[in-house]
Image (cartoon, grey):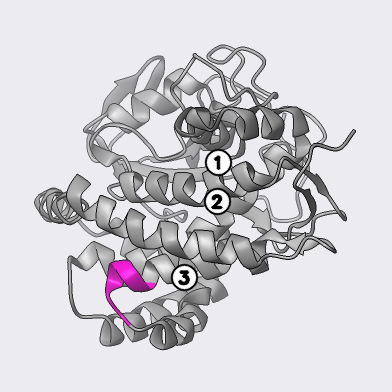
Amino acid sequence: MQAQREDISVPAWGNDRLDAPSSPEIEDACFDHSLDAWVFSRHADVLAAFRSPSLVPAGPNSKHTSDLEPYNESKRVAMRAETLEALSPAQLRIWREQLDSEVFTLLEALSIAQPVDLMRDVARPLCLSLAAMVIDIPMQQAETLRTTAQPVSASAADPYNSTLRTRAKAANVELRHCLHSGPETLRDGGFVALAHTMPALLGNAWYALLQHPQQWRLLHDQPELTGQAIEELLRHAGLSRILFRRATEDVTLNNAHIRKGDRIVLRIFAANHDPGRFTHPGEVDITRRDAGQLTLGTGKHSCAGASLLRMAAIAITQPLVQRFASATLAQPVDWQGSAGFRSPTSLWANLSFREAK
């Protein structure tokens, strides 16, 4: 059963969040009349939705006219191909080398005489620097555009907020006027992803590690596990709580008979914590073998920038954990965001070069 909420048009699955008191409720696919949408929470159902060619990305409100416009699949495929070409392994190596240098310099200068805000002092400056590299703009301009882009990120975090949605549209127009070079998806959308979404993703991942100090220590001792650790952190602490799809034709997914035009809410966080798919899903285990996290999607509608996000997560997290043998929360975390995603506003931590006894 869903928790009571003041506005029945907005979902409120209270346990679909990183700091929830208990595990998410995993239910069979069902049509929620208050949301006017199907709701998928099982891993198998969400996976089927990602893989189905009959379901396309959509917005949260089925009555929103912009969401009812015809879906241009050919344009999406062309933009995806352009993005993947821009994110070639060779180009990612170049950005990785540049980012490595900045990460090393920042961490070397980091004082541990007092608690450190990992969001303010590490995640946000490094992700903004990467955004400037990728978009190919000066840091001064990137700092200005980060403020401009804030409403876009806020709207993604709270997709049912119509006021934020209006502000996001205006901000996107302003960003497009300022960013002209490179693939279209690596301009305004790419800048928002790197300057705002990426720090939020790192904040969730690091919060999970701080909550499981034995995993921090294991990663410190075995840095070769970082790639695998990032996949586990994406599963356990991935940013997206929900995503939306719309059916372009009648389709049956598992036992759900979906009609053309129906809206589908994908509970990503819940699917990543489905005990039917993952052993002990509430625990962080960087040696986990049962892969299949859905934070970045899968199939033809997976995140086109996934390789860039993974590179950044590894490039920033690995040296952080290698440099500091242990880390503990210095104070309770304040959270920002809503139905779309939630992340720490700040993440104050006590860092130590030696493991605390």
Q: CA distance from mark 3 to mark 2?
A: 14 Å
Q: Which sits in the foreground, 192 or 219?
A: 219
The amino acid beneath tag 2 is Leu
Q: Residue at x 23, y 36 (%)?
A: 300
Few, some or many residues within 10 Å of mark 2 (<14, 14–19, 20+): many
Residues drawn in magenta: 132-137
Q: What percent of the width, then of the height, locates residue 27?
A: 60, 21
Residue position marked by numbered label 3 in the rendering: 128
| Left or right of residue 278, residue 350 in this image | right
The amino acid beneath tag 1 is Gly
What quarter of the picture does the N terminus occupy? top right
Q: What percent of the width, then of the height, locates residue 355?
A: 80, 37
Q: Residue at x 38, y 15 (%)?
A: 254
Q: Residue at x 17, y 56 (%)?
A: 86
Residue position marked by numbered label 1 in the rendering: 238
CB under 8 Å between discs 2 and 1: yes
CB under 8 Å between discs 1 and 3: no
Q: Is residue 281 above or below residue 244?
A: above
Quadrant position of residue 274: top right
Query: Element type at marker 3?
Result: helix
Q: What percent of the width, then of the height, locates residue 11?
A: 63, 46
Look at the magenta stretch and give its main secondary structure: helix
